[in-house]
Image: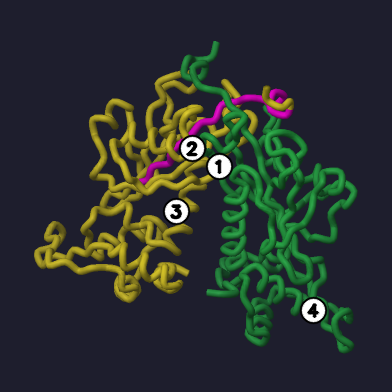
Chain colours: A green, B yellow
Amino acid sequence: MAPHRYTEAEQMLVALDCIIFGFDQNELKLLAIKRDFEPEKGNWSLMGGFLRRTESLDEAANRILISLTGLKNIYLEQLHAFGEVDRDPVERTVSVAYYALIDIHTHDKELMKAHGASWFSIHDMPDLIFDHNHMVDAALKRLRYKASHQPVGFELLPEKFTLPELQKLYECIYDTELDKRNFRRRMLSMDVLIKTDEKLKKYSKKGAFLYTFDKEKYNEKIENGDSTVFKPILS
Amino acid sequence: MAPHRYTEAEQMLVALDCIIFGFDQNELKLLAIKRDFEPEKGNWSLMGGFLRRTESLDEAANRILISLTGLKNIYLEQLHAFGEVDRDPVERTVSVAYYALIDIHTHDKELMKAHGASWFSIHDMPDLIFDHNHMVDAALKRLRYKASHQPVGFELLPEKFTLPELQKLYECIYDTELDKRNFRRRMLSMDVLIKTDEKLKKYSKKGAFLYTFDKEKYNEKIENGDSTVFKPILS
């Protein structure tokens, strides 16, 4: 028999909500779904679900993310547990929020459609249900912070990208314009970008060289204690 | 009636565990309690408890902290939700860990005694139950990180402190020796310490001036966008 400390304790629901960011050429976007059950049926919501007794929090967050995007091995990080008493009007539910960064062009469009999911610019988002707006604010704050200290931004780009695309991404994350020459110099001085032979000619006749992020080299530098390798883009 | 999504979802326990750090002259310490119920009765544990349906996560963390230390208005921050399936062998329990920083000389010693609580040097801690060792590791990592970016260290000191005491605190947090002259210069250049007329003569005949932390001035600088005000002690 379980000790009375356990039997006296109150059971409740634990939910997960995913703040999914994507980058689309010149906009940072958020994935929201149309909720298909009451309360708040038909309103915009983060993608979420309830934790099952047989899965860990991380496993549940991955399950929910895969069910919507079809993507595995996504950048996914726990953000915060939201625990206001009345945050869900139906049942006492603690929600553990995770945020994910995905390359907007790789997810499964059929799955998305089936869930009634849409991408919204973070500057033009609908009101979300419950405390989901707060969750998005907290995730944006974390993303901005992380992007100044760790190379998380690359998760939002295709494998090959141009320096103008990379700059645009950071401009979107920070919601500010960056000086082109300084940005290039800073990025290249980190010595973790590999220049390929290929050029992207979509935006200009001359084209721009495509780069890839050298994750191995980056990890090596970090392991060797090189704390300056990814300096804040803005500081 | 609640929608089936809710009625089908599985209820479980939500716990809170508090990683309480204190600083005692030349050591960073952790508060642990002797668990008084099964399983793991008699073993060392973090101070914790179950979330009640009528309180938020933050309220519950504060309740638990007050019940042990008698202290209100403590620096308390949510660390992470720990959600492995088998982390508690009795019942499926998600635990939300909070870490607290307190001035080791201000807490209620009678309450502590009643809970079988003891301070341990972080270099000489007993094995803790469940995943509590992981929680402490994560909290130490967060404390080290925070202390490089925000003036959280002052929460661990009495209101008035000497520069040698402040230096010792940072040396304990980082587990490394710091150069006295550089440390003084860095700290004073931030312009957020107020020198009092008083001297502490406990450690030397000549004594050392006591300082206080100017929280208002610090907050003002932050609000004015001065991002350099609290530079990492180590970088």
Q: Amino acid at mark 1?
A: Phe
Cα gap from disc 2 to disc 4, whole angstroms: 48 Å
Residue at left offset 43%, top offset 26%: B43
Q: Is residue B37 left or right of residue A96?
A: left
Cα gap from disc 3 to disc 1, whole angstroms: 21 Å
Describe the element under mark 1 as helix, strand or loop.
strand
Residue at left offset 88%, top offset 79%: A202
Q: Amino acid at mark 2?
A: Leu
Residue at left offset 12%, top offset 64%: B198
Q: Can you say whether B142 is above or below B134 in the image?
A: below
Specify few, some or many for label 3: CA neighbours under 10 Å numbering under 14, 14-19, or 20 or more: many
Q: Which residue is mark 3?
A: B143
Which residue of the protein is positioned furthest toward the left in this rendering? Answer: B205
Quarter assignment of residue A193 = bottom right
Q: Is residue A188 left or right of residue B112?
A: right
Q: Which residue is mark 4?
A: A195
Of the two numbered discs 2 and 3 in the rendering, the one whose residue sits closer to the viewer: 2
Q: Which residue is mark 1?
A: A82
Q: Which mark is residue B57?
A: 2
Q: Is residue A215 left or right of residue A97?
A: right
Q: Can you say whether B187 is above or below B153 in the image?
A: below
Q: Is any atom of residue A60 visible in this view?
A: no
Q: Amino acid at mark 3?
A: Leu
Quarter assignment of residue B89 = top right
Check contact, mark 2 vs mark 4: CB within 8 A. no
